[in-house]
Amino acid sequence: MKIEDFLIDNNFQLSTYYNTNKRYRKEITDFQNLYVRIYSDTNKIVDVEYEHKAISKFDKDSIISFETIETIEQLENLIKAFSNNKK
């Protein structure tokens, strides 16, 4: 399966791109986003990042990089984990 098709099927939206270097974004909550950067010509995940936006002046913006996520299956499990967390 193409990673790009998987991202679109899972409600990711194209955020930025330059040729085959594409970054997709999925809004988890109003203050949380999941980003996946891929090379669409080689069907390869380059990086996956979780972004938390500050809710108040006492909070800080932060980004966590998931360096070990390299396959669709791993990405699918991460998406499920975030989905289960919302309940």
Image (cartoon, rainbow, N blue to C red):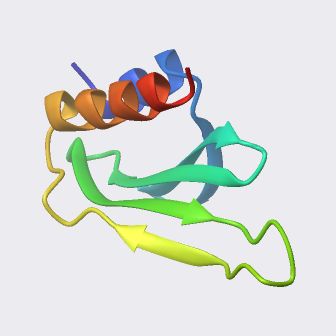
| Residue toward you, 49 or 43 | 49
Residue at left offset 73%, top offset 54%: 31
Compared with residue 46, is residue 59 higher up or lower down, i.e. above or below?
Answer: below
Image location of residue 51, percent across then percent down: 56, 63
**Camera sees residue 35:** yes
Compared with residue 61, is residue 51 higher up or lower down, i.e. above or below?
Answer: above
Extreme residue toward the front, this view: 58
Compared with residue 20, is residue 80 higher up or lower down, i.e. above or below?
Answer: above
Residue at left offset 25%, top offset 51%: 45
19 sits to left or right of 33: left
Residue at left offset 14%, top offset 39%: 71
Compared with residue 5, is residue 78 higher up or lower down, i.e. above or below?
Answer: below
Image location of residue 81, percent across then percent down: 35, 31
* Quarter containing the N terminus: top left
**Camera sees residue 18:** no
| Residue toward you, 61 or 47 | 61
Image location of residue 46, percent across then percent down: 27, 61
| Residue toward you, 80 or 74 | 80
Q: Would you identify the image quadrant in which residue 67 lies?
A: bottom left
